[in-house]
Amino acid sequence: MSDDTVPTDAVPPDAVPIDAALVERLVAEQFPAWSGLPVTSADPQGWDNRTFRLGDELSVRLPSAGAYVPGTAKESRVLAWLAPRLDVPVPEVVGVGRPGSGYPFPWSVRRWIGGTVAARWEGDRTALAADVGGTLRQLRAVPTDGRPGLEPGAHSFQRGAPPSAYADEVDEALRTLGDEVDRDACRRVWDAACSTRWEGPGVWFHGDVAPDNLLVDERGRLSALLDFGTSGVGDPACDVVLAWTFLDADARQVFRQEVGLDDDTWARGRGWSLWKALVMIERNDEPDVRATWTAVLAATLADPVT
């Protein structure tokens, strides 16, 4: 449910207003068996897709703009393949809706998965870091089975590609921010990230391992992995960004050990984190947002865990 595509506060030109009333109409028209169930907005709410709870056991997920439709359509078949091969629960699609009631995109109905988003977990994150690292290691080991259409591209917003896919945006952010950031340190991290590539066959990546896409139980252990809209098969470096956006130094070290990736992949992951932090700082005027991503940038620039 997080906004982890190209970070910008701009509204896509074909963005569609989505509210509970629209969801009620769509469900009534296309899934009359679920008509009348209460519809409530998810909290936190997403940007790429809007999510609403439908009764006690279901949820509805709708792309907010055309750019997110390819990921949403892909997600349904990806989840069906991955769900029986992962130990941690992932969403289960139980119905696919079509455009209607003035809404122009396909949408889906899923089983509701209860839990607290990790972003709101205030306890120690070390155990969660271990759980996420182990889950990503298991994800990489799932056979890709030659599944077509999952190579990095528009559907994944270039997740799974080398971080250099966003080199122009990094260059622009560094020019715009000027002395507001340590440009030399940024360049060192970025150059290291772009100096290697994933060798060998592509592996499964999630593409948006963000705190709002991780559910935890009452002990702070990982209980579900959500939002596979930017998933695919390629370089898994994008999946380690959580190390700098959410984890402290101790949890980061545990995460790195459990995720089991080599130094070059870790360096490319730092590049993904650097890109995200720079463009979020550059494109936002809100002090709280800038402060959050300035802290992420500082963590990214610090000496990597060895």
Image: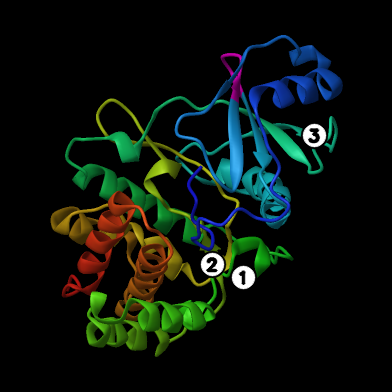
Q: Which residue is mark 1?
A: 152
The answer to whether marks 3 and 1 mark residues whose Cβ atoms lie closer than 8 Å is no
| Element carrying mark 1 | loop
Task: State whether residue 86 appears in this view.
Answer: yes
Q: Which residue is mark 3?
A: 97
In this view of the protein, which residue sits in the foreground, 227 or 234?
A: 227
Q: Residues within 10 Å of mark 2 (few under 14, many from 20)?
A: many
Q: Residues within 10 Å of mark 3 (few under 14, many from 20)?
A: some
Q: Which residue is mark 2?
A: 159
Q: CA distance from mark 2 to mark 3?
A: 26 Å
Where residue 92 sits: x, y (%)? 62, 34
Q: CA distance from mark 1 to mark 2?
A: 6 Å
Stretch of the chain drawn in magenta: 53-58
The answer to whether marks 1 and 2 mark residues whose Cβ atoms lie closer than 8 Å is yes
Query: What quarter of the picture does the C terminus occupy?
Result: bottom left
Q: Is residue 198 left or right of residue 257?
A: right
Nearer mark to the viewer, of 3 and 1? 3
In this view of the protein, which residue sits in the foreground, 51 or 162?
A: 51
| Amino acid marked by disc 1 | Pro
| Amino acid marked by disc 3 | Gly
| Amino acid marked by disc 2 | Arg
Outermost residue on the front side: it is 285
Q: Is residue 168 left or right of residue 62?
A: left
Look at 59% across and 27% down and name the residue there.
52
In this view of the protein, which residue sits in the foreground, 157 or 269?
A: 157
